[in-house]
Image (spheres, helix red, strand yellow):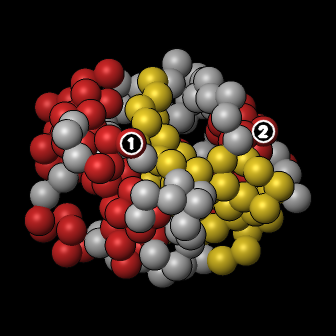
C-alpha cells in the first residue's frame, strides 16, 4: 500500500447495500463500537456513507455527545440527514462534507471511526497527519478495512504509515471479514 492508493469511492448507487439487515448481522455497529464510545464524546464517522454507523454511534452517546458524519459525497450526507430528520438524533448528528484529499474539519474529536474507507484515500500520509491534528490528546482512531480489498501486506504497509504519522496501535480487534486496529496518537 503505497502513498497513492485508490481514489475510487463507493458510489451512491451502492448506498442502499451499505445499510441492510444482512450487513447488520455481519457487522453489527453496536457490538463493534460499544467498547469504545462513551457519553459526552465527539465522534467522527469518516466516510459515513448513508449513516450505518453514525446512527448507532448517536444511540450509544444517548444524547450526551456529538457525531460528525463526514463524507465526500453530498448524496450520502443527504441520506444521513433524511434518516435523522424529525428525531432526537437530529440534535446529535452533524453532517460534514469533506473536500478532495482533505477532511477539512476544524473541531477536535475524541474518536474517529474509519470503516472500510482508508483504502479509498489517495494519500495515507496526509490523511493520517490530518487525523492526528483533529484528535484530542486522549483520542482514538479505529481503522477497519475489508479483507476482500486490502491484503495483509497492504494493511501492514498502511500501519507503518500510521506509525510514521505518530500513532501507536493499542489493540487489534477481531472482526469478521475485516482487518482492524485501534490506534492512539503519540
> Callout 2: helix, strand or loop?
helix
User: In the picture provided, is 11 more to the left or to the right than 118?
Assistant: left
Q: For mark 2, what is the residue?
A: 133
Image point (50%, 48%), residue name: 66
The part of the image, by quadrant, that contains residue 97 is top left
The part of the image, by quadrant, that contains residue 62 is bottom left
Tell us which disc is closer to us: 1 or 2: 1
Q: Position of residue 58 (x, y in %)?
A: 39, 57
For marks 1 and 2, give the CA distance: 25 Å
Image point (35%, 63%), residue name: 59
The part of the image, by quadrant, that contains residue 12 is top left
120 versus 144 height, above or below? above
Q: Position of residue 143 (x, y in %)?
A: 55, 58
- Looking at the image, can residue 90 be seen? yes
| Dot placed on the residue nearer the N-terminal end, 1 or 2 | 1
- Residue 141 or 37: which is nearer the viewer? 37
- Residue 48 or 94: which is nearer the viewer? 94
Q: Position of residue 117 (x, y in %)?
A: 45, 45
Q: Crowding near pointer 1: few (<14 within 10 Å), some, many (20+)?
A: some
Return the residue found at the far top. 100
- In the rendered image, the quadrant that contains the C terminus is bottom right
Q: For mark 1, what is the residue?
A: 91
- Residue 17 or 84: which is nearer the viewer? 84
Q: Crowding near pointer 2: few (<14 within 10 Å), some, many (20+)?
A: some
> Callout 1: helix, strand or loop?
helix
User: In the picture provided, is 172 more to the left or to the right than 15?
Assistant: right
Image point (73%, 48%), residue name: 135
Amino acid at each position: 500500500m503505497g502513498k497513492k492508493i485508490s481514489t475510487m469511492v463507493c458510489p451512491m448507487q451502492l448506498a442502499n447495500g451499505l445499510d441492510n439487515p444482512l450487513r447488520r448481522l455481519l457487522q453489527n455497529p453496536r457490538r463493534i463500537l460499544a467498547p469504545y464510545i462513551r457519553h459526552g464524546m465527539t465522534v467522527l464517522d469518516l466516510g459515513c456513507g448513508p449513516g450505518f454507523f453514525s446512527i448507532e454511534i448517536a444511540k450509544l452517546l444517548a444524547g450526551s455527545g456529538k457525531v460528525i458524519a463526514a463524507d465526500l459525497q453530498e448524496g450520502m450526507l443527504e441520506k444521513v440527514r433524511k434518516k435523522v430528520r424529525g428525531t432526537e438524533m437530529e440534535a446529535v448528528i452533524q453532517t460534514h462534507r469533506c473536500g478532495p484529499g482533505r477532511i477539512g474539519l476544524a473541531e477536535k474529536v475524541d474518536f474517529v471511526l474509519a470503516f472500510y474507507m482508508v483504502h479509498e484515500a489517495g494519500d495515507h500520509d496526509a490523511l493520517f497527519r490530518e487525523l492526528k491534528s483533529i484528535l484530542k490528546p486522549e483520542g482514538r482512531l479505529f481503522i477497519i478495512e475489508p479483507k476482500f480489498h486490502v491484503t495483509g501486506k497492504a494493511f501492514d504497509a498502511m500501519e507503518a504509515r500510521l506509525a510514521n504519522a505518530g500513532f501507536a496501535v493499542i489493540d487489534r480487534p477481531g472482526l469478521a471479514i475485516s482487518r482492524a486496529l485501534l490506534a492512539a496518537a503519540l
